[in-house]
Image (cartoon, rainbow, N blue to C red):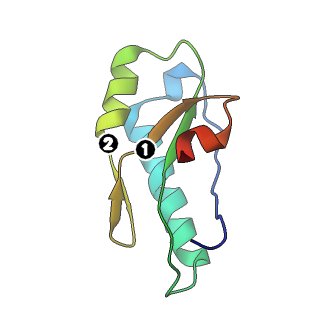
Amino acid sequence: MGDLVGVVRKQAPDDCFARTHVEAQLLVGANLADRWLPPNARFQFVPVVAHRRGIRRERLKALQRTSVTLREQKRRPKLIRCGSPLRQALA
């Protein structure tokens, strides 16, 4: 698969954890990765959202229904808790 490329953005408190806000962050991360990756790079795109405890269930379910695209790879984000190993989302 090659080198691991990650784009990480710390998430704000619950009041800023709106679906549209997180979708925008995922899109910015995908756009950055698109610029960084060589044109013919082979990779598996895995968008990840790390959240803290106390995020409302309906917000988490809405995030699970969203998707982000990077070079024709349309994916739903993997949700993990803050402090969890990143490999948990990549497994």
For label 1, the residue is 77
| 17 left or right, relative to 67 | right
Query: Which residue is drawn at the image coordinates 38% and 23% (left, top)?
Result: 59
**What residue lies at 71% left-to-right and 29% top-to-bottom?**
83
Q: Position of residue 79 (x, y in %)?
A: 48, 34
Residue in the foreground of this view, choosing between 12 and 87 = 87
Residue 66 pos. (x, y %)? 32, 42
Q: Which amino acid does label 1 sit on?
A: Pro
**Which quadrant is home to the N terminus?**
bottom right
Residue 15: x percent and y percent? 51, 21
Residue marked by disc 2: 66
Left or right of 57 on screen, residue 65: left
Determine whether label 2 and label 1 are within 8 Å by CB. yes
Q: Quadrant of residue 32?
A: bottom right
First in sequence: mark 2 or mark 1?
Answer: 2
Mark 2 vs mark 1: give the one in front. Answer: 1
Mark 2–mark 1 Cα distance, whole angstroms, equals 7 Å
User: How many labels were placed on the picture?
Assistant: 2
Q: Which residue is drawn at 67% across and 70% down?
A: 3
For the residue pair 29 and 48, the one nearer the viewer reads as 48
Figure check: 47 above or below 57:
below
For label 1, the SS is: loop
Task: Give the image location of residue 86, x and y in percent.
Answer: 64, 42
Q: Badge 1: few (under 14), some or many (20 or more) residues near its Cα, within 10 Å? A: many
- Residue 68 against residue 2 in the figure, above or below: above
Q: In this view, does 77 lie to the left or right of 72?
A: right
Amino acid type at image mark 2: Thr
| Residue 61 left/right relative to 55 | left
SS at circle 2? loop
Task: Out of 58 and 74, give the one closest to the viewer.
Answer: 74
